[in-house]
Amino acid sequence: QSALTQPASVSGSPGQSITISCTGTSSDVGAYNYVSWYQQHPGKAPKLMIYDVSNRPSGVSNRFSGSKSGNTASLTISGLQAEDEADYYCNSFTSSASWVFGGGTKLTVL
Amino acid sequence: QVQLQESGPGLVKPSETLSLTCTVSDYSISSDSYWGWIRQPPGKGLEWIGFISHRGTTYYNPSLKRRVIISLDTSKNQFSLKVNSVTAADTAMYYCVKAIGGSSLFDFWGQGTLVTVSS
């Protein structure tokens, strides 16, 4: 199975909004509403930010939102803050009853 | 609060077997949920290794399936990972995780343990 495609890097200024895309196929992202997003700071374990395309776990800021259109899922962060600077990974269920991650996107807050 | 803690050797020789255990606290692994492993090579992205259901059904990454076994030990409330015939490419931070069936919710993660494959 191939990794989902994410941009290697995105950047934005404090207060702005950014969107990270995650492109898969009709066998994974396009087939199921089982897409999640993780935030990872250096040296830390990943933290779940969005699950099932657009659901936020308890405790995650409502500045984080998720959506999906066709084979592409997206994570939007509004009102960028310095602490949002991290790596972000998408994850999807696949038709092979397995899970596949994206290659990761490094978010820089300017 | 559910807690997961990985344990095992930090150094494994090439061609040998990597063995890790995840001890789960404050939640019975036999009650429900899926239990599994995700790894991350240094400086690289996340890779799903596999899951085992609370009933013992296993699901593996197709690219690792031939070398991986995940098992449950309900008496100790632990689950384990074995990766056979390791190479330097298996050097990674290994995380154990709990997942909710019927969703993409991997709700609890261990802190991770670094395994280096080297002679």
Image: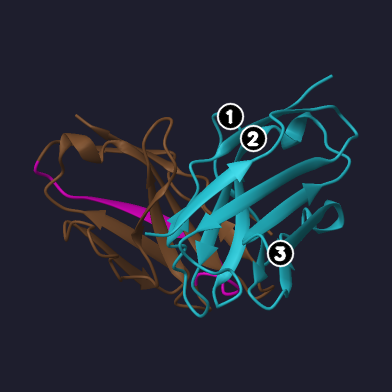
Chain colours: A brown, B cyan
Badge 1, how many Cα within 10 Å: few under 14, some, many 20+?
A: few
Magenta part of the chain: A15-29
| Amino acid residing under circle 2 | Ala
Residue A57: image x %, image y %?
Answer: 29, 65
Res. A3 visible in picture: no
**Real-space Cα distance between discs 1 and 2?**
6 Å
Q: How many marks are shown on the rendered structure?
A: 3
Residue A72 among magenta residues: no
Badge 2, how many Cα within 10 Å: few under 14, some, many 20+?
A: many
Furthest toward the top, the residue is B119
Report which quarter residue B24 is drawn in.
bottom right
Residue A84: image x %, image y %?
Answer: 24, 41
Picture layout, residue A2 above or below residue B99 = above
- Which chain does the numbered disc 2 sit on? B
Seen in the image, is A34 located left or right of residue A97? left
Q: Are marks 1 and 3 in contact (CB under 8 Å)?
A: no
Residue of label 3: B72
- Which chain does the numbered disc 3 sit on? B
Query: Which quadrant: the C terminus of chain A?
Result: top left
**Real-space Cα distance between discs 1 and 3?**
28 Å
**What secondary structure is marked by label 2?**
strand
Picture layout, residue A15 above or below residue B14 = below
> Is the same chain shared between marks 1 and 3?
yes
Report which quarter residue B40 is drawn in.
top right
Residue of label 1: B42
**What secondary structure is marked by label 3?**
strand
Seen in the image, is B24 located left or right of residue A46? right
| Amino acid residing under circle 3 | Leu
| Amino acid residing under circle 1 | Pro
Query: Which quadrant: the N terminus of chain A?
Result: bottom right
